[in-house]
Image (cartoon, rainbow, N blue to C red):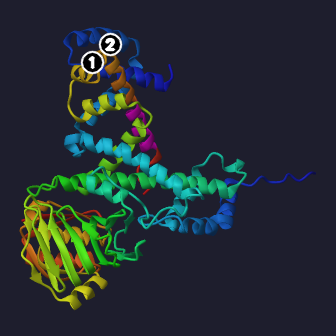
Amino acid sequence: MNAKQLQKEMALWIVRLNTDDLHERQQAQIEFEAWRSKYPEHHDQLDQMLNFSETMQQFSTTHGISSQNVRNSMKVSQQSKKHILQLFSKVLLFCVSIGGVVYFTANSTMMSYYMADYKTEVGQMHSITLEDGSKVTLAAKSAIKLDFTAEKRQINLVQGDIYIDVAKDPQRPLIVHTAQADFKALGTRFIVYQYANSSVLNMLHSKVETRSLAQNSQVKVVKQGEKISADSLGLSPISELDIASTEFAWDKHQILADQLPLADLLSNLGRYHHQYLIFNYSTLKDYKVSGVINAKQDLDQTLRLLLTQYPIKITKLGDHVIYITSK
Amino acid sequence: MIPILPTPSRQQILQEMYLDHHDWLKQWLNSRVRYPFTAADLVQDTFVKLLQSKQLFSIQEPRAYLVNVAKHVLIDKHRRYILEQNYLETLKQHADDQDLLITSNQIEEAVVILDFLTIALQDTTALTRKAFIMYYFEGYSQSEIATEIGKSLRTTQLYLAECLQLCYEAKNNLLELGLDER
């Protein structure tokens, strides 16, 4: 009997001896005793495998590995291999769009990031000119999907922030679509920021018609020098903004926080750094941050600053995982 | 006396390969890899792999061979990287503020676990995998699984045994290779 064959037999014994069917189990026990006395030299290995099987049953509690996690892992590791093979084959060498190393999880936003038409990597900013002449700049780790038809030009903001300079086309209105609202350009320049539960419009030139996707389908026209935020409840009141500093902040990767939920700030910072920030959105969303934060500056420095102002605790796990919890 | 031409030693072949192709390989990889991987690391790992290669004496096309080794090194590295991202993403969604349960060591272990699970199960059928996941990660009993997948208890047991053996083997292989090549 070769090693593999032996392992297979032992695996079957282990499974059979652990069945919930009482009758089956008794039968297995009887047969197993015969096997056991026949192969005393394999007892050690059998014990090892039994141990392994029991350890494996505990992975969900000992390491927080869920069944969904295992399924996703199967999926992504196959994608990963395909991706690397493409990287090594000459034909497809240049087909990797703006994104570099592509990864995603089955988490729906991550999946849509992967499927997006244009996307940027951590810390990158990228400008593109669309077929209609409109200029779009994507902030770090941002993604858009285009839906251009004869009647409309729709840009779906999958994640992150975009700055857009719209080319005029009276026949085809341009709409930036987010989960919370549709922003219909009436000829114009503006920025849309997508956060976890809200999206924010900053008007830099001309005006935009904002239609809430909440039940009340509220519509408000936002003019130059104004901003509005949309969430699942509807639209916020319109407030004023400083155009020059907004443009400057965009260019310099600054976050102009005005009562920004701490959780949104952290997600935003995460898009500029390779460290992985883990936090609970709902507990950190109630702390509001105001001020100018340079997204690209050293992350440790920024976090230390936040630490002095908010009741949070920061724990580092190894080099690149940072756990942020409230005290 | 006829002088015997000395056959090159392992050491010599490696040295030559290193001198002749190191820079070329690094450049070749430079245009292809991105964060979090670097061409320099990859070249290093590729030559380490080469050190363990049994075919060292029969390599015909050194560059093609090196690229192929580099490819497999990168496939492994990249898989672990995305498995880690994927795992962290789930942690993020279930981040519980009350207590910090996961340690950095556990993250590393979890990646190793997910690594050998995916390697082990990659060629199994969907039904086999379903049975495996239900049994080991969702706490279903064997008869419940049999009903769910519409197979006999015996077949279900064969599925589970197949996976158990594959996982056990994959885990041992991984340990043998040395877990930490990252």
The residue shown at (35%, 28%) is B127
Q: Judge whether A160 appears above or below B179 on screen.
A: below
Of marks 2 and 1, the one in the foreground: 1
Answer with the quarter of the image where residue A236 lies.
bottom left
Asked if marks 2 and 1 touch (Cβ < 8 Å), the reply is yes
The residue shown at (7%, 61%) is A216
Q: Is residue B172 magenta?
A: yes
The residue lying toward the viewer, choosing from A109 and A88, is: A109
Name the amino acid type tagged 2: Phe
Outermost residue to the right? B1
Q: Residue A32: which disc? A: 2
Q: Judge whether B5 appears above or below B152 on screen.
A: below
Dot 1 alpha-carbon crowd within 10 angstroms: few under 14, some 14 to 19, many 20 or more: some
- Tell me, yes or no, if residue B105 can be seen here: no
Dot 2 alpha-carbon crowd within 10 angstroms: few under 14, some 14 to 19, many 20 or more: some
Percent x, y of residue A24: 25, 11
**A34 on left or right of A201:** right
Outermost residue to the bottom? A244
Percent x, y of residue B8: 74, 55
Mark 1 highlights which residue?
Answer: A17
Name the amino acid type tagged 1: Leu
Q: Chain of mark 2?
A: A
Label 1, secondary structure: give it.
helix
Q: CA distance from mark 2 to mark 1?
A: 8 Å
- Tell me, yes or no, if residue A35 can be seen here: yes
Percent x, y of residue A61: 19, 42
The residue shown at (32%, 54%) is A111
Q: Chain of mark 1?
A: A
Instruction: Specify the segment rendered in magenta.
Output: B166-176
Answer with the quarter of the image where residue A286 lies.
bottom left
